[in-house]
Image (cartoon, coloured by chain):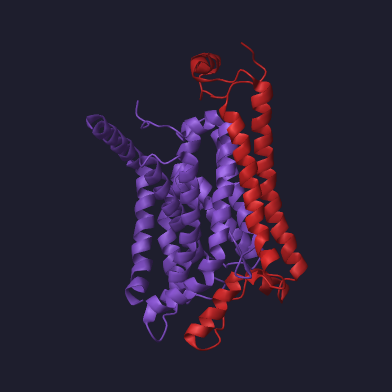
Amino acid sequence: MRNRVKRLASRLSAFEQSLTFSRSEKVVLAISLAFTVCFAMPATAQAMHIMEGFLPPEYCIAWGAICVPFLVLGVIRIKRLIANTSRHTLILLAMAGAFIFVISSLKIPSVTGSCSHMTGTGLGAILFGPTPVSVLGIIVLIFQATLLAHGGLTTLGANCFSMAIAGPIIAWLLYKGALALRINRSVAIFIAVMLGDLFTYCVTSVQLALAYPSDVGGVVASAVKFLGVFAPTQVPLAVVEGLLTVLIIIGMQSFASKELKEISFGEKKAGVA
Amino acid sequence: MEKKKSNKLTVILLIVLVVAIIFMPLLILPGAEFLGSDDGGSKMVSEVTGEEYEPWFTPVMETLIGGELPGEMESLFFCIQTGIGVGIIAFSFGYLAARKKYGGDLPDEGENDALTEEPLAAKGSKPPQQKPLRQKN
């Protein structure tokens, strides 16, 4: 019991350490937060990839503004990763980004008779935590929005929030939670990634519902309707994404155990020695 | 390592499962169109609002070429995206696998001290943490 408390305390202090920022980092972070407060609040008071031009402008700006601090934090995290670990851990980061590229480019048929694609952001979230993935995710989203007319530049903020922020955060939390419950690591990864992927589409539904509340029943009824479109299609795909992520992590464990150790993946104890 | 064997089995099982889940809909739903669910979402928008929604912004690419991207071109771009991703992953796994196979004595805990000392002595700047591949014990 006491051991566990100790472990928790050391983990907390590690978390605190990760929250201390240098001065310039603080400034940028503060600016980004101020940006959020300025732009995001009015819209929220009123009021998968969403297609180009399908969200009213004020929502586009609001969602975009919400994303900014996460992206800034992500860039800071990545910078630190580069500074504090050996260059080889970058291979893992590149692979996590490439995984998003591959996974989100594959349109996969589902039992509902329509196609959808997965997000692929769960892998990065499990390896590096949620914020670095936001940066990787937005690269993919920009690629798709400009070249493929898939998603869109105006809806970039909303899509980024659902796919590269909300999904990874849920995946990461579930993964940590499952590990704390001493669930088998592979199973934990599978569950976390699967539900993270599904959550992305829940967020998308809510985003659409906020912008287009139904006449009868308002936002909630509308959200349920949008969920009805996305969820059934997405369930099998979420399972596939979970399985693929487990696969690639097995691969990493057998070939890059040193780098995984360096980003403290797979450690049973807290990072503080 | 006995763990390796069970890993192999899991990997094969997982791949079979993934393929099965992906191709099952094709088999049980012959003749379905498999349109994107993103489109389904936009249809739902017009259903909820009760009127055809007119997007207020056309994709950059479509304005640029003055029309919709031809289907074949779209699949080309999707392939490029997949290709970039697969390329990076394949290269990385190739690199890592080769390192494991030929690098043999890569730094592992005990050796760490030796390798950080060396470059430090040689150069006062940042200690590169990576060990030259060909170096042997």
Q: Colour of chain A?
A: purple
Residue B21 versus residue B122 in the image, above or below: below
Q: Residue furthest front?
A: B28
Percent from the top left, x then y, of residue A139? Answer: 57, 54
Front residue of A110 and A116: A110
Above or below, comparing residue B3 to residue A113 in the picture: above
Direction top: furthest residue: B137
Name the residue at the bottom extreme: B51
Quadrant of the image occupied by residue A70: bottom left
**Residue A77 in sight from this viewpoint:** yes
Tell whether A66 sits left or right of B87: left
**Residue in the foreground of this view, choosing between B113 and A8:** A8
**Which corner quadrant holds the C terminus of chain A?**
top left
Image position of B66 (left or right of A41): right
Rendered location of residue B5, percent (x, y): 61, 31
Q: Which residue is drawn at 77% across and 67% down?
A: B72
Q: In which quarter of the image is the N terminus of chain A?
A: top left
Q: How many labels does the image show?
A: 0
Whether residue A212 sits left or right of residue A47 in the image: it is right
Nearest the viewer among B31 and A127 is: B31
Q: Position of residue A250 (x, y in %)?
A: 57, 38
Answer with left or right where residue A46 lies relative to residue A88: left
Residue A154 is situated, as x and y percent measured from the top left of the image, at: 53, 70
Residue at the spot 69% in from the left edge and 73% down from the top edge: B33
Residue B56 appears in view: no
Write the residue at 48% across / 37% down: A81
**Vertical arrangement, residue A42 with respect to residue A69, above or below:** below
Picture colour for chain B: red
Quick one: which residue is furthest to the left in this view?
A: A2
Q: Nearer the viewer, residue A40 or A38?
A: A40
